[in-house]
Amino acid sequence: MLTIVAAVVAGLLSFAAVAYVVWPLVSSRPAPVVVEDDRLTELVGRKDAVLAAIKDLEFDYYTGKLGDEDYARLDQRLRRQAIGLIQQIEKLAPESAVMDERLEAEIARLRKTRNGAGEVTPQPSRPEAVPAAAPPADGVTAQTPQAAAPGDAETPRFCTECGQPLQPSYKFCAHCGAPVASASPTPAPHT
């Protein structure tokens, strides 16, 4: 009985898969057409080509393949072309020009947090050092724990590139992939 049910379920799934694949071939309605703005696509492609040409021109100039005169003339011509293409793109798609401003404003908003007084303060991107505590008013000095050596497991480590916390065994940052400087213990002086 169980094998019959399994065979029926397998047959129904197979039929559904075949129908899904064959249906667009036998249906009478036209296939959906992806509408692209050919003019906008062409302009973006031309802009990318001009920007790549500017980079190549700068490379040739800095490697000594071009003189100052030739570089200045060609650079000016390519930059005028790039500016013209960017202006044409903005005319065809004005919402994309405003979209960058909105995106930057949203990023700036997300990077800020509210402090206790309700004021907006920027959130630090990397961990900052804790300021030293002021001495007690009664004149008695409090004992402070000794700083741990860089190789100790108790010392928190952070990535120098992105600021994410690191485990002692990490050789690369799990967040950004940057190599982690190995913390080698300092040798004790011989007496």
Image (cartoon, helix red, strand yellow):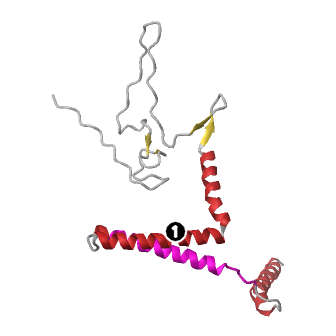
Left or right, 109 with reference to 81? right
Most foreground residue, 88 or 28:
88
Residue located 37% across and 72% down the image: 73
Left or right, 110 with reference to 133? right
Image quarter of the N terminus: bottom right
Most foreground residue, 88 or 45:
88
Which residues are the magenta region? 32-60
Residue 97 falls in image quadrant: bottom right
> Dot 1 corresponds to which residue?
83
Compared to residue 2, the image places residue 176 above or below, namely above
Image quarter of the C terminus: top left
Residue located 46% across and 21% down the image: 133
Task: Give the amino acid at mark 1.
Answer: Ile
Residue located 32% across and 74% down the image: 70
Residue located 23% across and 33% down the image: 188
Q: Main secondary structure of the magenta part?
A: helix
Q: Give neighbour class at mark 1: few <14, some 14-19, many 20+ (Cα, 10 Å).
A: few
Compared to residue 60, the image places residue 156 above or below, namely above
